[in-house]
């Protein structure tokens, strides 16, 4: 049984270590325990104090046999703390998020904790697994391309509760965890299968997603002689946006004819694509593909908050590469 002692003898604690004293009485919570012939007080490098006694029956004081109750003995006056970070991230198509951890400063704590899910906008999507029910997991593996979070942002919010299981009365504490789901390029057809299948050998897939909310300035990209250059992008949430992609020849390649198109998988030809109508452009000095989001019209019809690919290929390039400047505009 662990206990805390308050020894009101500053001269002992301040003395050289260890310090031996004869015929010493201990006053514990207002009660004097007598009969000690020796007491040694040792302060460790970590600042902890160890008290060793000889002669008296200290257990009688600690158990109340000599009258009184030691201060803080077996108390449970501190809440437990969930020490797991409030922000976690995993890659799509996985379920386990994190093994939960907690701490408790009470001496009476058993050292074991019980966890439960008590709130959060996305709590229904989570469960606790593992032998100790301390692993936060998705019930079903999340899909980055089809977010199921309450705000469709791929960040899931869940509130957890920990109970300290103290034998003298349990105490609890809560913590909110934000779980971000990241994209797995293999799931986009990047060579590992997924919904798009294996990446065709003639498709050069750009790993970085083209952010249409911040498309940036015109940028030169390499387009090999016969390969398809495929660039992923995600449409904004707004359903009234429209815009275009443009690929402009660099100096010396103005006579090279190119095709550009939007598809649902990297390099997928537009005549096989469900968004094929109006999603392809051809040209020499400049090739454009115009699109609109969440509405029908004369341009390529795209859905909001969805992953697509803009593809470009040279049709009559005679060099190893015929590079272009890429540009995006959205309004």
Image (cartoon, rainbow, N blue to C red):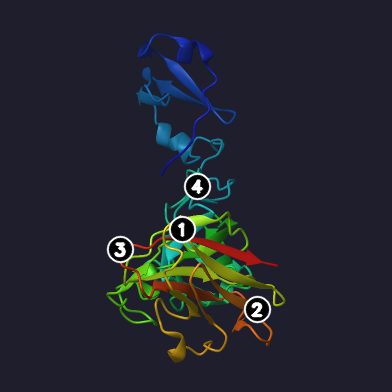
Nearer-N-terminus badge (3/4): 4
Q: Quadrant of the N terminus?
A: top left
CA gap between label 1 and label 4 equals 65 Å
Label 1 close to label 2 by CB (< 8 Å): no
Nearer-N-terminus badge (1/4): 4
Q: Nearer the viewer, residue 150 or 289?
A: 289
Which residue lies at the image location 63% right of the left edge and 65% below the top edge? 329
Q: Nearer the viewer, mark 4 or mark 2?
A: 2
Nearer-N-terminus badge (3/1): 1
> What residue is shown with label 1?
250
Which residue lies at the image location 57% right of the left edge and 31% below the top edge? 29
Badge 3: residue crowd in 10 Å (few <14, some 14–19, many ≥20) = few
Q: Is residue 164 something that shows in the picture? A: no
> What residue is shown with label 4?
104
Badge 1: residue crowd in 10 Å (few <14, some 14–19, many ≥20) = some
Q: Nearer the viewer, mark 1 or mark 2?
A: 1
> What residue is shown with label 3?
319
Label 4 close to label 2 by CB (< 8 Å): no
């Amino acid at each position: 049984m662990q206990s805390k002692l308050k020894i009101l003898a500053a001269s002992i604690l301040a003395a050289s270590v260890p310090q031996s004293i004869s015929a010493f009485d201990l006053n514990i919570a207002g009660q004097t325990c007598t009969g000690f012939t020796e007491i040694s007080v040792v302060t460790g490098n970590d600042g902890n104090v160890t008290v060793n006694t000889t002669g008296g029956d200290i257990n009688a004081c600690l158990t109340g046999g000599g009258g009184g109750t030691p201060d803080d003995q077996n108390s449970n006056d501190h809440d437990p703390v969930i020490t797991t970070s409030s922000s976690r991230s995993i890659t799509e198509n996985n379920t386990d998020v994190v093994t939960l951890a907690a701490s408790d400063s009470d001496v009476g704590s058993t050292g074991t904790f019980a966890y439960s899910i008590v709130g959060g906008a996305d709590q229904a999507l989570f469960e606790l697994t593992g032998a100790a029910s301390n692993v936060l997991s998705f019930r079903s593996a999340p899909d980055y391309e089809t977010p199921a979070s309450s705000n469709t942002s791929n960040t899931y919010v869940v509130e957890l509760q920990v109970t300290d299981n103290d034998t003298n009365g349990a105490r609890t504490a809560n913590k909110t965890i934000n779980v971000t789901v990241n994209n797995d390029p293999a799931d986009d057809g990047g060579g590992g299968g997924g919904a798009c299948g294996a990446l065709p050998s003639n498709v050069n897939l750009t790993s970085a997603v083209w952010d249409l909310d911040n498309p940036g300035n015109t940028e030169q990209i390499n387009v090999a002689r016969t390969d398809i250059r495929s660039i992923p992008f995600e449409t904004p949430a707004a359903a009234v946006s429209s815009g275009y992609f443009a690929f402009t020849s660099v100096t010396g390649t103005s006579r090279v004819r190119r095709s550009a198109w939007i598809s649902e998988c990297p390099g997928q030809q537009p005549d096989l694509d469900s968004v094929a109508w109006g999603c392809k452009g051809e040209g020499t000095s400049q090739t454009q593909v115009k699109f609109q989001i969440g509405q029908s019209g004369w341009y390529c019809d795209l859905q909001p908050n969805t992953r697509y690919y803009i593809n470009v290929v040279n049709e009559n390039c005679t060099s190893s590469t015929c590079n272009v400047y890429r540009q995006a505009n959205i309004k």
